[in-house]
Amino acid sequence: MNILDLGDVQLNYREDGDPSGAPVVFANSLGTDLRLWDKVVPLLPEGLRIIRYDKRGHGLSSCPPAPYAMGALISDVERLMDALKVRDALFVGLSIGGMIAQGLAVKRPDLVRAVVLSNTAAKIGTVEMWQGRLDTLAQGGIEALADAVMERWFSKAFRATPELIAWRNMLVRMPAAGYGGCSAAISGTDFFASTSGLRLPVLGIAGSEDGSTPPDLVRETVDLVPGSKFHLIRGAGHLPCVEKPGEYAEVLSGFMREVGHV
């Protein structure tokens, strides 16, 4: 494991592939760590420099006091990429990771040459909805949210498999402050205006059974950027990279080839 000490936060990150290859940076969803991409990474083209990291409050990264601002989450990965001397990356963000991707592409176009917005949107939910979840979190901890989260994350078929318990455990074992801090960041974010100004290659990916960011919500955001592409993964929920890793990797690899990243 690798830890980058940024002073206010310590980020856990992992590098795979060719250190001199074209960089691909992955940003995870709320409640998951960098293992979210374990099934996809081995299926990608050879020769890439693949970078994954844990957001603040997630995985093996430190957990500063909540709440967090979206600007802080964007700054974290910005500083990570600067420290690793990454430029012109393909940035793949899922859910809150996709919000981070949108903000980073606007703030630092030198870092990002193409973006994959997976199961995400320019605005997710309402302030009232997120406050309700934060209230439940305060009263009952993450365990009180877990079953509802699993229903939004995964299709009914996947929820019937033994693998579900591993993802539920990943969620409930994370710090409540990390989950709540990032929930607050999502609650306060509306990127419609800034994302509509982006002019770079964008691929949107949605899951047909996604209970967090339904396909129409993802498409609405992707359509803000002229020339963007959209792909629907049928039979998958909020984390299609877990349920349908083969199709996810195929679509991602095709986009890399289209934009000349491989």
Image (cartoon, rainbow, N blue to C red):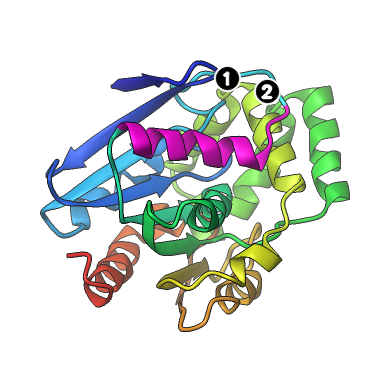
Tell whether position 73 is magenta: yes
The image quarter containing residue 138 is top right
Viewport quadrant of the N terminus: top left
- Expressed as whole percent of the image width and height from the top left, the position of residue 160 reads 50, 50
Are circles 2 and 1 on residues that touch, CB within 8 Å?
A: yes
**Residue 11 left/right relative to 150:** left
Mark 1: few, some, or many residues within 10 Å (few <14, many ≥20)?
many
Instruction: Please indicate, yes or no, whether residue 154 appears anywhere in the rendered image.
Output: no
Which of the two residues, 112 or 46, is positioned nearer the viewer here? 112
- Expressed as whole percent of the image width and height from the top left, the position of residue 36 reads 40, 43
Q: Which residue is drawn at 46% across and 83% down?
A: 227
Mark 2: few, some, or many residues within 10 Å (few <14, many ≥20)?
many
The part of the chain drawn in magenta is 67-83
- Secondary structure beneath dot 2 equals helix
Vertical placement of residue 28 versus 166, above or below? below
**Residue 116 left/right relative to 178:** left
**Residue 19 left/right relative to 76:** left
- Expressed as whole percent of the image width and height from the top left, the position of residue 136 reads 82, 32
Q: Which amino acid does label 2 sit on?
A: Ala
Magenta region, mostly helix, strand or loop? helix
Q: Mark 2 points at which residue?
A: 177
Viewport quadrant of the C terminus: bottom left
Of label 2 and label 1, which has the lower sequence position?
1
- Secondary structure beneath dot 1 equals loop
Q: What residue type is labelled 1?
A: Cys
Q: Mark 1 points at which residue?
A: 63
Tell whether position 105 is magenta: no
